[in-house]
Image: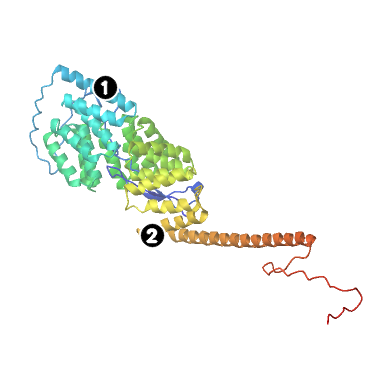
């Protein structure tokens, strides 16, 4: 039987392109479509600046250390230098600023309490009271993204860039959304414009390099990252992009080395740890890769890619409950990500939580109807799943239906014919079993009736002869003979 298949779901930026077969015997060694998210140069599809309760407006991402001036890199091809637009003149009273601060703090508390809807509204209230409080809108957009409210998130991020065009967090999230929706042209053009206005902004330059990677322009991405590193030799973002490009070019040792350097610069950078895990997988060092993904989750529990990757390797290690925990958290962080739900279904199936696994597969299918993999996994699940209250024949017939839908949808798996054949065999076997049961039931019923009839006959025999034909009319009792016994009767005549 085939081993589970690992198919990459490349969250923005689309970094790695690896497909490999990995075993998971406890899953019955059936071919389950697994999705391994990319790691190199990747960040969570939510935000570069995490919403944290202790974060104050304007302080997100600040280290408290003075930043040394850096050399302005040469403009990338296509960028034109232009004056930055003047910042909007906003007169905010002290009272409004205090109200904005109070709303921001309340929003942070709501985030901590898990009240996303309340947090979004409070962030927007804060931004309304003080339009210069751009971090409030960025945080609101982050939460909107997590809830799948993409259009609203885009509007908030564009408003931030209108007020503060060089806001790196707003730019990064907006570009990520544009790439997620396939709008590469706008992502590319928008960044060129912002870089033309703010050529010294290294975060914008790194974002542009990531867009180039997504466009498959690896040499240009490499050149842009080197410009950034020339300006700031400790720039981890640029190192991540170098690692990504070299991975794509199958220069694994170079990729590993640059990521080791990045780790030395920022030991707790979750993106670096996640990327290292991916390189270690390519180097066939799975145990080390698992630990790298685990370290990435510890460094940043909100990094969906790291949780997704860790969950996949835990499935392969037969730690299905552990995998289910990681992937459940990932699904909460990004509920609109079909690959995470697909992987969660695999973990739940391994844990024999079949009803939950079916729900996860159905969610993956709903989010990405054109992906045939959930159809395949549903077929496999129903082949040997435990669905209480569902007759075996119905379960097997459902499995066969899902596998047929997978084939009709253009799905391709080398063992598909075997699974279809197995389903047909099991269906026939179950039908034969049911037919035997029905025959046995009829035989038992006939035998029971015979026993009952015999019992009635014996009971009737004790009372006298019984009529064989119960439906015949009763015969009259003959009259007693008249005259003297032993003599001839007198003739009345």
Is there a contact, CB below 8 Å, between mark 2 and mark 1?
no
Is 156 on the left-hand or right-hand side of 301?
left
User: Disc 1 designates what residue?
Assistant: 105
Judge whether residue 283 can be spotted in this image. Answer: no
**Crowd band around label 2 with a 10 angstrom C-alpha radius: few (<14), some (14–19), many (20+):** some
User: Disc 2 designates what residue?
Assistant: 407
Judge whether residue 123 can be spotted in this image. Answer: yes
Q: How is the image coloured?
A: rainbow
Q: Where is residue 82, by image quadrant?
A: top left
Residue shown at 75% from the left, 61% from the top: 460
Task: In the displayed orientation, state which residue is furthest to the bottom.
Answer: 493
Q: Where is residue 230, by image quadrant?
A: top left
Task: Give the percent coordinates (x, y) of residue 101.
Answer: 22, 21
Query: Looking at the image, which is closer to me, 455 or 234?
Result: 455
79, above or below 21, in the image: above
Task: Give the percent coordinates (x, y) of residue 420.
Answer: 46, 60
Residue shown at 38% from the left, 59% from the top: 407
Task: In the displayed orientation, state which residue is furthest to the front.
Answer: 493
108, above or below 147, in the image: above
């Amino acid at each position: 039987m085939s081993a589970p298949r690992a198919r990459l779901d490349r969250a923005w930026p689309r970094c790695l392109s690896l497909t490999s077969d990995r075993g998971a015997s406890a899953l019955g060694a059936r071919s389950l479509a697994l999705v391994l998210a990319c790691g190199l140069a990747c960040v969570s599809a939510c935000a570069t600046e995490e919403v944290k309760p202790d974060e104050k407006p304007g302080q997100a991402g600040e280290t408290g250390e003075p930043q040394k001036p850096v050399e302005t890199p040469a403009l990338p091809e296509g960028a034109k230098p232009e004056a930055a637009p003047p910042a909007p003149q906003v007169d905010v009273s002290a009272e409004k600023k205090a109200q904005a601060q109070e709303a921001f703090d309340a929003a942070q508390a709501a985030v901590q309490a898990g009240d996303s809807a309340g947090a979004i509204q409070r962030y927007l209230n804060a931004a309304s009271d003080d339009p210069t409080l751009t971090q409030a809108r960025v945080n609101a957009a982050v939460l909107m993204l997590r809830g799948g409210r993409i259009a609203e998130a885009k509007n908030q991020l564009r408003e931030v860039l209108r007020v503060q065009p060089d806001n790196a967090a707003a730019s990064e999230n907006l570009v990520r959304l544009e790439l997620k929706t396939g709008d590469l042209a706008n992502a590319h053009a928008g960044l060129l414009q912002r870089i033309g206005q703010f050529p010294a902004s290294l975060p914008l330059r790194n974002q542009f390099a990531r867009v180039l990677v997504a466009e498959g322009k690896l040499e240009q991405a490499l050149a842009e990252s080197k410009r950034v590193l020339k300006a700031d030799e400790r720039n981890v973002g640029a190192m991540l992009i170098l690692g990504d490009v070299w991975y794509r070019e199958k220069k694994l040792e170079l990729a590993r080395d640059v990521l080791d350097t990045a780790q030395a610069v920022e030991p707790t950078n979750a993106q670096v740890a996640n990327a290292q895990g991916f390189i270690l997988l390519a180097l066939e060092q799975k145990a080390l890769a698992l630990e790298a993904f685990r370290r990435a989750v510890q460094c940043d529990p909100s990094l969906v890619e790291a949780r997704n990757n860790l969950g996949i390797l835990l499935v392969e290690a037969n730690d299905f409950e552990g995998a289910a925990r990681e992937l459940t958290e990932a699904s909460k962080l990004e509920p609109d990500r079909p690959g995470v739900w697909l992987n969660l279904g695999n973990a739940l199936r391994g844990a024999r939580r079949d009803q939950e696994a079916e729900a996860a597969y159905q969610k993956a299918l709903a989010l990405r109807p054109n992906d045939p993999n959930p159809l395949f996994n549903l077929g496999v699940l129903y082949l040997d799943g435990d669905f209480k209250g569902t007759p075996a024949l119905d379960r097997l017939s459902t499995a066969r239906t899902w596998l047929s839908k997978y084939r009709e949808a253009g799905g391709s798996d080398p063992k598909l014919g075997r699974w279809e054949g197995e389903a047909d065999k099991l269906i026939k076997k179950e039908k034969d079993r049911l037919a035997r049961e029905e025959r046995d039931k009829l035989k038992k019923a006939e035998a029971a009736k015979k026993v009952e009839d015999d019992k009635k006959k014996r009971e009737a025999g004790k009372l006298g002869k019984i009529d064989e034909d119960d439906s015949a009319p009763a015969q009259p009792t003959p009259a007693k003979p008249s005259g003297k016994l032993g003599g001839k009767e007198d003739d009345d005549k």
